[in-house]
Amino acid sequence: MNTGSPGRHAVDRLLARLPGQVLGRSAKRAGRFFSASICRFKPEEERCTKRDVLITTFYKAVQLRPTTQHGPTVNTPTSTPNTVSASDPLDASNPTDPPNPTNLTNATDEAEAPVSVNEARLWCNNGWTARVIKNEDDDGWAVEMIKDGEREPALVGPWTMGRDKKNPKPLDVSAFNTLVKTAAEVRRRHEQQLHALYHKNLTLETPSGRVRVTLDIVPDEDDPHALLAAHDAFDEPLAQVRVGATFKLSVASAQAWIDDDFRRPSGR
């Protein structure tokens, strides 16, 4: 077989028809180099057609398993087509590669991460914002603590004057952490008070057994109301009726409701 231009041009045409992202510069050079060695193939490979020999030569050059059935499959090490060599700068950027999901997740997390502000009169961290403001009652200063996502401050208290007796003392990490602890405790107590105000219950002994009566107030601005319910000793529901938000739950009112077979209280 002639090792001159016909075989070399055939390999070049084969390389030109393949997608650019599969071949790097080094693969193309290797393909052209092996085209000059076609005449030295083993006897069993010489039985292939000229087209099959050229295809086999190319895949030997780039160390890829052929995806067509034109020639024999070459058992060569599997390599990733899109792998880029450090010595191949022109292939370092491949616009056809899909975006890395990990990078997208990291970018989203960074965009959603809360902003930390550490200033003399404004400190934001750990879901809380401390802001030093003028005290409306006197010429001093005050600090308010606001939980992220809430409009009203959970805590408002006096703040220390600075050394110049004019400006407030700058916020720092220690003071902010103390304010967060105090504001969280105040907020927790306030939630407990609201729960006790809107959710009441008592237990009565009846001839049929113990009955627990609950009153859950729904402070809706458009339709305020309450739910009066009863449960037995096994916490199985016995009845539930809707009453006005001003319904007063007491032992007497609960007993009257039970004696009336859990009918909706009149006038409620």
Image (cartoon, grey):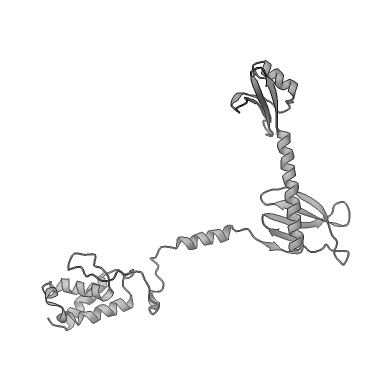
Q: Quadrant of the C terminus?
A: top right
Percent from the top left, x then y, of residue 14?
A: 23, 72
Give the quadrant of residue 171. bottom right
Give the quadrant of residue 236. top right
What is the count of numbered marks?
A: 0
Q: Residue furthest bottom?
A: 4
Q: Quadrant of the N terminus?
A: bottom left
Q: Decide: is 209 above or below 172.
A: above
- In this orientation, which residue lies closer to the viewer: 132 or 85? 85
Q: Decide: is 163 above or below 241.
A: below
Percent from the top left, x then y, of residue 255?
A: 71, 19
Residue drawn at 72 percent across, 38 percent down: 194
Q: Would you say residue 265 is visible in this rendering? A: no
Residue 158 located left or right of residue 10: right
Residue 77 located left or right of residue 122: left
- In this orientation, which residue lies closer to the viewer: 198 or 18? 198
Q: Decide: is 87 above or below 243.
A: below
Percent from the top left, x then y, of residue 238?
A: 60, 23
Percent from the top left, x then y, of residue 25?
A: 32, 78
- In this orientation, which residue lies closer to the viewer: 190 or 231? 231
Residue drawn at 66 percent across, 26 percent down: 212
Residue drawn at 72 percent across, 40 percent down: 192
Give the quadrant of residue 256. top right
Q: Would you say residue 93 is visible in this rendering? A: yes
